[in-house]
Each structure stands twice: as structure tokens, then as C-alpha cells.
């Protein structure tokens, strides 16, 4: 069993920031990631609100920069694998990663969120056959075509702006009559001539035997139903915490997000959380990065006290 001073779970912005600070404190650290480093940055097109990049930056480029910044630190082990089980036994923190157990004095959980599905029949089959959760990854498959975007928050609005430059027409389908995104971005979608607003509207069915061919819409104000032919549908209708592996004793809010104090400490000594997985209001790259640094600082203090 390998033993580390700190194990960081998830190499999104929060995890990579935490790992950078831990490595610079000289702590023997493992950064565990089941996919590629970057987390949701890899599904994000233009990032225009991360300080230091006045012209914006593509999500994957920012991910590459963050990852590259970790490479000089020899006290940082990067482990490719998924955490499947996390046990706390008599104060020991044990993490099962693929076919290996790790032991850590401190753990920072940065596992982020998972995007929600619409919950309609045929959705799993049509995922990757016209349905997508990633405009950056799949947008170019729909060049000059007609697509829908479901959702009304920051991701739906921001990604619609990106997609509208590629597709011929975009139907933005939202169940309410107003968006929950930043007013600046909402103004921009209103000025984008190939975006059609389908407000007070829900998707009731997905059609297509081999590939998505269209969707059924229901107007909530009139109750009217209609068929909308589409080549693609991008779904951004909320998210849930990625927390299936967490020990039960870690406090969470009613939606399953981890509750911490301002120093990113959970209710269990030596266990910390940072980024989108935390119970909070602002889920952004800049907050994830700040919380990663705060958590690493709290780990450093915790380890100093633990080791006298
Ligand atoms: C489409 C879209 C556009 C966005 N645009 C912006 C924007 O313009 N500006 C902005 O500030 N924010 C934006 N965001 C939000 C931003 O991407 C997130 O707030 C940020 O990525 C959160 O970072 P994180 O490190 O907490 O989580 P994530 O980025 O989700 O990273 C979590 C990581 O943990 C890994 N992981 C999870 N479970 C395990 C496990 N069991 N074992 C190992 N690894 C695991 C995942 O694979 C992932 O890599 C956008 C998000 C989306 C989806």
C-alpha cells in the first residue's frame, strides 16, 4: 500500500490548484484522476471570465497550462485511475483506486459534478447519436445544421453562443420565461440572429431510430405540443455531485454537495473538499482554483499539527 501525506481526488481546476500548492509546501502528494486532467474545462469552449486572459482562452488550453505547471514537482505523483471506495478506519484514510489501495494523512475531494440527463426514453441510446453534453467536443459535427440546446443557466447560454457560430439555426429551449445566466451573456444571445427562443417550453420526447431526428415540445403556457426536427440536441439542465464513493459520515447538504467551513474543512478531521463538489452558490473555474489553494493551505496546517 502506497502512503501519501495528501491525496487529491480529481484533476479539474480545483484538484490541480490544490496539488500545485501541496507540492510547493513540500508535501508528498498524489493527484488521482480517472480521465484526462482538466475536468469540465475539457468540455468548455471559450473561457472569458478567468482573470489574466483578456481575450479569453479555450478550456482545453487552460487545462493544459494547469497540468504543465505541475510537472516540475517530484514530490507529486499523478495517478491515473478512478477512486471507487474511500474508507475511514480508526482515523486512517484508505482509498481504493482501480486495483490499488492508498493511505493518506489528508484527503482533498475535488470530484466535481455530473451533468443531468433529461430523463426521457431513448436518451441513453441517442447520447452520441445526436445528443451531447459538450458543445466544444461535438459542436463541429453539426456545422451548418439545426440544433437544440436545453437549459437556461450559464452553461446553456454560454455554450449556445459558441454553437451559434457553427450551426445554421439553434433553438434554445428553456422551461421558464427568463434565463438564470449572467445578464451580459443573455444580452449577447438576444442579439444573435440565428438563435430562436423556445421559452416556457419543455421537451417531452426524443425521436430517432438510429440517430436523433427531432424532439417533441410542450408549451407550458398553452399546453400545445409540437414536433421540432433537429440534427442535434445539447443538454445543459443542471448537475449532481460526483460523490458515490464518499464515506457516509462526511456531511452533505440536501442535494448531496459536501459541506465545509471557509478553510475547506469537512466535519471529518483531515478530509477537505474544494470546487464544484462543495455546497456553495458560485461554481466557476476561479472559485474552484481559489478553494483548491485554500484547502491545500488547510492541509498543510493540519499535517503540521498532526505531526507535532
Ligand atoms: C459547458 C460548460 C461551460 C463552462 N464555462 C465556464 C466558464 O466560461 N467560466 C467558468 O469559470 N466556469 C465555467 N464552467 C464551470 C467550470 O468548468 C467548473 O466550475 C470547474 O471546472 C469546476 O472545477 P472542479 O475541479 O471543481 O471540477 P471538475 O472540473 O468537474 O473536475 C473534477 C474532476 O474529478 C474527476 N473525478 C471525479 N470522480 C473521480 C473519481 N472517483 N476518481 C478519480 N477522478 C474523479 C473528474 O474526472 C474530473 O476530471 C463551465 C462548465 C461547463 C460544463
Image: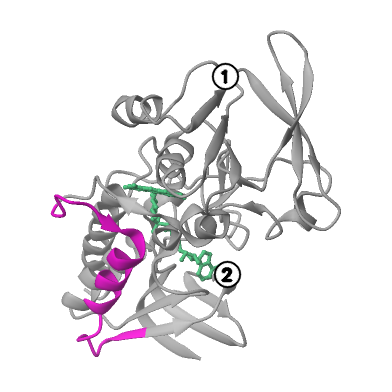
Picture coordinates of residue 142 (x, y %)?
A: 57, 54
Magenta residues (range): 52-77
Q: Is residue 297 a member of the stretch shown in magenta?
A: no
Which numbered disc covers residue 176?
1
Decide if residue 264 is in sight here.
Answer: no
Give the residue drawn at x 86%, y 53%: 209
- Seen in the picture, residue 275 relative to 153 is either above or below; the reply is below
Q: Are marks 1 and 2 in contact (CB under 8 Å)?
A: no
Q: Residues within 10 Å of mark 1 (few under 14, many from 20)?
A: some
In the displayed structure, does residue 258 sit left or right of residue 307? right
Give the residue drawn at x 35%, y 38%: 282
Image quadrant containing the C terminus: bottom left
In the displayed structure, does residue 299 sit left or right of residue 195? left
What colour scheme has been applied to the protein in the rendered image? one colour
Q: Is residue 61 a member of the stretch shown in magenta?
A: yes
Picture coordinates of residue 289 (x, y %)?
A: 27, 56
In the displayed structure, does residue 83 sit left or right of residue 44? right
Label 2 near ligand 1 (CB < 8 Å): no
**Helix, strand or loop at disc 1?**
loop
Q: Residues within 10 Å of mark 2 (few under 14, many from 20)?
A: some
- Seen in the picture, residue 215 relative to 49 is either above or below; the reply is above
Question: Which residue occupies the foreground of this view, 167 or 59?
Answer: 167
Residue denoted by label 2: 87
Q: Residue furthest right?
A: 209
Question: Which residue occupies the foreground of this view, 256 or 289?
Answer: 289
Q: Earlier in the sequence, mark 1 or mark 2?
A: 2
**Helix, strand or loop at disc 2?**
strand
Give the residue drawn at x 70%, y 14%: 220
Picture coordinates of residue 136 (x, y %)?
A: 46, 57
Task: Indicate which quadrant contains ligand 1.
Answer: bottom left
- Quarter of the figure with residue 170: top right
Query: What whole-number distance in Å separates the C-alpha atoms at marks 1 and 2?
Result: 42 Å
Amino acid at each position: 500500500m502506497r502512503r501519501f501525506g495528501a491525496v487529491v481526488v480529481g484533476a479539474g481546476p480545483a484538484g490541480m490548484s490544490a496539488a500545485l500548492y501541496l507540492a510547493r509546501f513540500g508535501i508528498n502528494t498524489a493527484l488521482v484522476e480517472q480521465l484526462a486532467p482538466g475536468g469540465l474545462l475539457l468540455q468548455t469552449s471559450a473561457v472569458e471570465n478567468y482573470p489574466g486572459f483578456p481575450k479569453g482562452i479555450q478550456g482545453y488550453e487552460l487545462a493544459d497550462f494547469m497540468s504543465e505547471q505541475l510537472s516540475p514537482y517530484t514530490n507529486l505523483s499523478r495517478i491515473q485511475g478512478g477512486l471507487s471506495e474511500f474508507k475511514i478506519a480508526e482515523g486512517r484514510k484508505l482509498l481504493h483506486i482501480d486495483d490499488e489501495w492508498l493511505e493518506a494523512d489528508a484527503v482533498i475531494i475535488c470530484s466535481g459534478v455530473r451533468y443531468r440527463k433529461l430523463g426521457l426514453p431513448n436518451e441513453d441510446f441517442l447520447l452520441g447519436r445526436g445528443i451531447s453534453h459538450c458543445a466544444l467536443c461535438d459542436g463541429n459535427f453539426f456545422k451548418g445544421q439545426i440544433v437544440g440546446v436545453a437549459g437556461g443557466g450559464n452553461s446553456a447560454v454560454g455554450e449556445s453562443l459558441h454553437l451559434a457560430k457553427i450551426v445554421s439555426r439553434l433553438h434554445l429551449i428553456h422551461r421558464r420565461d427568463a434565463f438564470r445566466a449572467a445578464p451580459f451573456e443573455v444580452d449577447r444571445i438576444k442579439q444573435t440572429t440565428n438563435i430562436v427562443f423556445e421559452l416556457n417550453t419543455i421537451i417531452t420526447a426524443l425521436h430517432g431510430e438510429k440517430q436523433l431526428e427531432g424532439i417533441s415540445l410542450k408549451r407550458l403556457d398553452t399546453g400545445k405540443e409540437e414536433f421540432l426536427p433537429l440534427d442535434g440536441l445539447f443538454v445543459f439542465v443542471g448537475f449532481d455531485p460526483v460523490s458515490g464513493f464518499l464515506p457516509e459520515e462526511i456531511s452533505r447538504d440536501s442535494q448531496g454537495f459536501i459541506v465545509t467551513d471557509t478553510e475547506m474543512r469537512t466535519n471529518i478531521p483531515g478530509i477537505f473538499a474544494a470546487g464544484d463538489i462543495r455546497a456553495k452558490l458560485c461554481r466557476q473555474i476561479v472559485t474552484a482554483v481559489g478553494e483548491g489553494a485554500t484547502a491545500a493551505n488547510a492541509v498543510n496546517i493540519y499535517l503540521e499539527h498532526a505531526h507535532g
